[in-house]
Image (cartoon, rainbow, N blue to C red):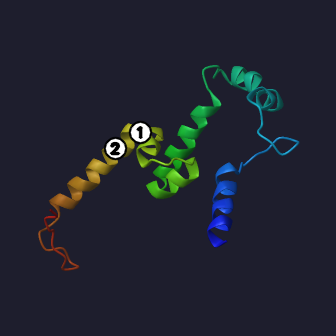
Amino acid sequence: MKDAEAATRVKAYRNARLFVGPRGGRIQITVLRRATHWDEVVAALGYEHLRRHSLRHTGLTWSADVGVSSHLLQKIAGHADPRVTQLYLHPNTAALQQAGNLLSLHLAAPQRPPNGHHLRLIK
C-alpha cells in the first residue's frame, strides 16, 4: 500500500505545474503569448529575437552566478540529467576571469598559510 501511495505522489509531483490555465490544465503557448502581450513587449524593447525559453537559460545562469548549487539548479529546471542543466548555464567572460584570478591568488600564496593548512594533491 505504501508503494502505491508513494508512486501516486511521485506521479503528481512530476505532473505538477507552476502555472495552470483557467480550468487547471496546461497553458497553451498562444494563450500565454496573448495574455502577456509578449510580441508587443519584446518589439517595443527592441528584442524581437528574445524567446521565453531564453529566460530559462538566463534564470538558471543568474542563479548559478549567485551560488545556487548545480543539484538545486537541476531540480529547479526539472532535468533528470545534470549534463542537460549544464547546457543551460552560460557564465560570462568576467566570471571566468575572476575564477582564474582567484585560483592564481591561491596558488601564489605562501606555502604555509596563517591557518596552518597545506595544499595537498588530490588523486
Residue at image x 15%, y 73%? 118
Which residue in the protein does label 1 denote? 92
In the rendered image, the vertical position of residue 59 relative to residue 5, given as above or below = above
> Residue 43 occupies which quadrant of the picture?
top right
Helix, strand or loop for disc 1: loop
For residue 14, say whether it is visible.
Answer: yes
Neighbourhood count class around disc 1 (C-alpha, 10 Å): few under 14, some 14–19, many 20 upward: few
Position of the C terminus, as image quadrant, is bottom left
Q: Position of residue 102 (x, y in %)?
A: 28, 55
Mark number, residue 96: 2
**In the depicted view, which residue is nearer to us: 64 or 105?**
64
- What is the x, y in percent for residue 5? 68, 67
Image height check: is 112 above or below 43? below
Label annotation for residue 18: none
Q: Position of residue 23 (x, y in %)?
A: 88, 43
Q: Secondary structure at mark 2?
A: helix
The answer to which quarter of the image holds residue 83 is top left
Question: Which of 9/96 is in front?
Answer: 9
Task: Verify CB contact (< 8 Å) between mark 2 and mark 1.
Answer: yes
Q: Nearer the viewer, residue 59 or 95?
A: 59
Q: Position of residue 34 (x, y in %)?
A: 81, 27
Relative horizontal placement of residue 25, taking residue 46 as reference (left or right) = right
* Residue type at the position of mark 2: Leu
Q: CA distance from mark 2 to mark 1?
A: 7 Å
What is the quadrant of the N terminus in the image? bottom right
Amino acid residing under circle 1: Asn
Q: Residue furthest right?
A: 22
Q: Residue at x 76, y 22 (%)?
A: 40
Q: Residue 82 or 47: which is nearer the viewer?
A: 82
Q: Is residue 69 visible?
A: no
